[in-house]
Amino acid sequence: MRYPTIVVAAYNRPKSLARILSSVGNADYAGYPSVNLIVSLDGGGGHEVAGIADTFEWKHGEKRIIGHPGNLGLRKHILSCGDLTCTYGSVIILEDDCFVSRNFYDFAVKALDYYGNDERLAGISLYSHRFNENAGMPFMHLNDGNGVFFMQVPTSLGQVWTRQHWKGFREYYDQSVVVSEEDDLPENVKGWPESSWKKYFYKYITEKDLYFVYPYESFITNFGDVGTHCTGQTQVVQVPIEAGRMEKQYKFVPFDESNQKYDGYFEMLPECLRSYGVRIDPSC
C-alpha cells in the first residue's frame, strides 16, 4: 500500500495522453526505487493513442498497458481502474486531461502513510478545488495553517485509493445502488449522466459519512479538454499547482483535530463553524 501504482486512464485524446504522461514522467521519484505505471486504454480510442502509450519511456519501474478490447465507457473504465487495488494495494488514478506537479507522488505516499488506515476516509485527493461545481461559484477553503482539509466530495481529478477504500465502495456499488431524486445530494449531482461513476461514489460517502482528504495546495490540475463527456473545453477546473518545494514536508493533521471539514455541498460543518466563534442555530 505504501507505494501506490500510477494508473492513467485514457480513451481517444492523444494530445491529452501525451501531456499527462510527460508530466508523470518528469515528476520527482527520489527515494522510491520502483514505481509501477499502468496506462489503461478504453477500447475504440484509436491507434494513435495506443502508439503514444506504447512508445512512452518509463524510467522509474514497471510499465504495463491494459488495452480493453471493447468500449467500456467512463464509468466502467474507472471502476476497472479502481479494481486494480486488489492487485496493487493502492493506486493513483489520473484521467488523461490532468497534469501533475513534480511532487504529486511524494505527497500521495506520505498522505497514505498518515491517513491510509483511517476508516472515516474514502480516499485522498491530489486536486484542490477552486470552484464549487454544485453552486457554480468560486470556492476557497479557509487556511488554518495545516496542509490538508476534509470534504464529503469525491474527486475525479486525481484520486488515491487503497484496497480498503475501494472495497468499501465496491461492495456498496455492487448492491445495484441507484441515485434518485430522493437522495440527499446536490441537484446537479443527481442529474449527472449514467456514465458517471462519481455520482455513485458521492452517494456512498454521504450515506456512510465518509470524507476525502484534500491538500491545501493542489498537486494536480486539469485542462478540461473536449471529450466524450465534455463537449466544449472549460477552464473552471484549472487551478494553480504546488511549485515543487525542495523540503517535501506536508503539514498533516488528524481528522479529529481538524476544524476544516466540509459537507457534500462544499459547506463547512456546523461544529467547525462554531470552533471559529460563529454563532449559529443550535439545532444545526
Image (cartoon, rainbow, N blue to C red):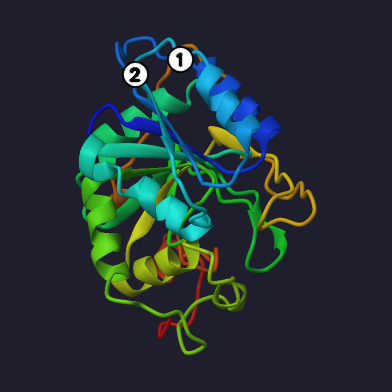
Q: Is residue 64 above or below residue 146?
A: above
Viewer-side residue, 254 vs 206: 206
- Is the residue 234 above or below the residue 98 in the image? below
| Residue 126 seen in render | no
Closer-to-camera residue (63/197): 63
Apparent side of residue 122 relative to residue 44 in the rendered image (left or right): left
Q: What is the total number of numbered labels drawn onto the structure image?
A: 2
Q: Is residue 267 left or right of residue 239?
A: left
- CB-based contact (under 8 Å), mark 2 and mark 1: yes
List the residue tagged with mark 2.
62
Give the label on residue 58, or none: 1
Q: Residue 174's x, y, as percent?
A: 28, 69
Q: Quadrant of the C terminus?
A: bottom left
Q: Secondary structure at mark 2?
A: loop
Find residue 221 and report its horizontal and vertical position in percent.
62, 37
Which one is nearer the viewer's eye here, 41 or 155?
41
Quarter occupied by the N terminus: top left
Q: Which residue sits at x=54%, y=14%?
A: 26
Residue 77 image offset from top left, x and y in percent: 45, 52
Residue 2 as seen in the image, left or right of residue 248: left
